[in-house]
Amino acid sequence: MNQPSFSSRRILRPVRPWFIWLSMMFALLLNLMPLGRTPMLPDWVALVLCFWCVREPLRAGMGAGFVFGLLMDIGHGSLMGQHALAYVLLAYTAGTFSRRILWFGPLQQSLHVLPMLVGTQLVMLCVRLSTDAEFPGLGYFVGSVIATLLWHPISFVLLLPQYRPEDKDENRPI
Amino acid sequence: MASPVAGHSPPPFFRRGPAPLARLVVLVSAALTLIVVDHRLNYLELLRQGLSVVTTPLQVAAGMPVTGVRSAGEYFADLARLQAENEDLRREQVALGTIRLRQEQLDLENTRLRALLDMRERVQVNAQVAEVIYAVRDPFSRRVVVDKGLTQGIEPGSPVVDDIGVIGQVTRVYPLNAEVTLISDKDQALPVQIARTGVRAVMFGAGSGTLELRYLATDVDLREGDRIVTSGLDGVFAPGLPVARVKSVDRDGSGGFVRILCVPLAGVESHSTVLIMAPGKPVLPADDAAATAGSARAEKAVKP
């Protein structure tokens, strides 16, 4: 399945706003799974937020990042505002680079996503280390690498509702 | 941005609210305020409780598949293993039964003797058994969540022990469950004493599941393998609960203090059933000059 990008000829339907919120809620649900202290799990909320900020910078942005960040802070019992700060910065960066990132194919897109996700984790690390928390070890950053590998599959899944059936019409110009 | 011509506002598809940079500044400063207020002032428990109305149903829903898989695994657990465990438990119960009989007798004797000596009676500790549901995902701290909460009368600050020794302290209470900060957490302080010599100290988490005794002079009488028990100076933990065993003593460190690493005795990082004790009411020492740095530091740990 080729990704809709500058090179593909596919036209997507407009996104439904409720689907953005539903996917964010589902990502939050995945993040709240009680799997114990496993720092290598990907941060689904950051990934999905990053996706929507790149794909629909006018519909999902820093406000969504802040709200879901607060929910994550409460769900994980971490310092209040820690995820909120990191997600707001992530949403800003993703929104700013949205035009540039969409120009690339899936592999290069994920290469853009990796520094953004690692940066999100670095922000959280700085916040927590400045409040005398324990350094969780370098395995903490593996989560971002896994999330980067998930970028292509997740963008396919999240764009599924926008694909229109391929009906070949020879008389239609596009 | 230029002001709109009189009577004409910009068409709706150009209206995008405040500029991204302005929004970024507002939200980042809001988040930073939250961080500082939560870390320094502890005012946000109400906001936490309020917003947990949204997250608690999500957490319950997210927990369902995990508990389902776990209970299925238990269902198919090895029969032989269960039988062996049952046998062990039965033997242990018989052993404990004899101890309990003696204990009752000793308790009676103790109260009688204490009455004779006109001493204050020891507070009856009532405790509740709770199950650890999961470890908190936050990788920067060491906390677990247990299945008893406000509705079962759990109070913040309650000591948590298992069958061997101290595990931690309840730090946050939700309606249906409570968060226990383990003694291996970096922020958790515990007033202890060395069982062999009676030297009092304060124990902190040292990361990666170990503990550290701080603020002891380099000439302190301490060996590897010494048992550390709670001193009870904080009035929250009962005195004499086993905490840890000394793993290494490094007297060459700079700074004038000896660096002592300990391993917890109780299954701090691996446990399923714990006992939540009611927090003792701090008894102010009338003429105990020894309640120095230890108890002052311990106040930090008592704070819910």
Image (cartoon, helix red, strand yellow):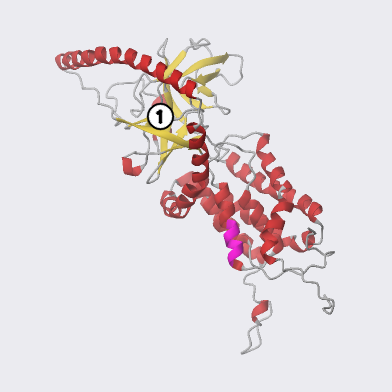
Q: Quadrant of the N terminus of chain B?
A: bottom right
Q: Residues within 10 Å of mark 1 (few under 14, many from 20)?
A: many
Who's the residue at 70% across and 43% down the image? A146
Observer-nearest of A130 and B84: B84
Left or right, A124 with respect to B129, comes to right
Which residue, as the protein is rendered here, is positioned at the far left?
B116
Residue A2: x and y in percent read 80, 59
Who's the residue at 55% across and 15% down the image? B247
Observer-nearest of A28 and B303: A28
Residue B88: x and y in percent read 41, 16
Kindly report the secondary structure that dominates the magenta region of the rendered protein. Answer: helix
Read off the magenta span.
Answer: A18-24
* Residue A84 in view (yes/no): no
Residue B80: x and y in percent read 48, 20
Q: Secondary structure at mark 1?
A: strand
Chain hosting mark 1: B
Residue B116: quadrant of the picture = top left
Is B179 part of what is drawn in magenta? no
Residue B303: x and y in percent read 40, 37
Question: Where is mark 1, residue-wise?
Answer: B274
Residue A102: quadrant of the picture = bottom right
Who's the residue at 57% across and 47% down the image? A31
Figure check: A147 above or below B125: below
Left or right, A66 with respect to A150, comes to left
